[in-house]
Image (tube, rainbow, N blue to C red):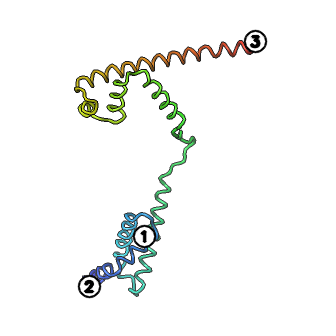
Amino acid sequence: MAHGEVLEFEEYVRTRQDALLRSARRLVPDPVDAQDLLQTALVRTFGRWDGIADKRLADAYLRRVMINTRTEWWRARKLEEVPTEQLPDACVDDPTEQHADRALLMDVMKVLAPKQRSVVVLRHWEQMSTEETAAALGMSAGTVKSTLHRALARLREELESRDQEERAARALEPSKERERCAA
């Protein structure tokens, strides 16, 4: 390719760049992908620039290259999907479990003294530092640490106690079921 042809291509790109980018934007929704599409089309067209006899048709040629390139990208993306015998397990958040956990937590928090509850809420829900919590509650950082330690220990005990009660209740359920079936 001669030097004059390179300048001719550069001049063409400089004058038609905005219109070509608008065409690329119509082909792909993401602006960054549109710029990539245009750049790829320009690189491919540069190699064949001297083969375009009527330069007035260069826009049409470039649009066709962009369409073909977009189609290649789409096909390549489709080939990345691999068929499998079994579908993977879909993880879907169950809001009922979240509500149940929150209700349990709110209920368990009732066993704490008001000062302990305040420290737990500020440190863990509000994610305040020990110093910020101490300043907000008007106590020393050491008091915040010891109060938090005792409060978390009390919460663990309460949760373990409730867990044991629940297991005991579930263990009794089958025997109640057998009694109903025998009657």
In x, y percent, where is residue 48?
A: 37, 77
Amino acid type assigned to the residue bearing label 3 in the image: Ala
Closer to us: mark 3 or mark 1?
3
Query: Number of marks in the image?
Result: 3
Kindly check if marks 3 and 1 are in contact, taking CB atoms under 8 A apart as contact.
no
**Is the C-beta separation of discs 2 and 3 under 8 Å?**
no
Dot 3 or dot 1, earlier in sequence: 1
Q: Which residue is located at x 42 percent, y 70 percent?
A: 25
Residue at label 1?
25
Q: Is residue 166 above or below residue 124?
A: above
Circle number at residue 4: 2
How many residues crowd around disc 3 within 10 Å: few (fewer than 14), some, or many (20 or more)? few
Secondary structure at badge 2 equals helix
* Residue visible at 29% across and 35% down in the picture: 128
For label 3, the SS is helix
The image shows residue 174, relative to residue 121, as above or below, that is: above
Q: How far apart are marks 2 and 3 (CA)?
A: 100 Å
Q: Is mark 1 on a helix, strand or loop?
A: helix
Residue 119 occupies quadrant: top left
Residue 13: name its quadrant: bottom left
Residue 182 - label: 3
State the quadrant of the C terminus.
top right
Q: Choose the circle earlier in sequence order: 2 or 3.
A: 2
The residue closer to the viewer here, 171 or 43, is 171
Q: Residue at x 51, y 39 (%)?
A: 93
The amino acid pointed to by label 2 is Gly
Residue 61 position within the rendered picture, expressed as x and y whole percent measured from the top left: 43, 79
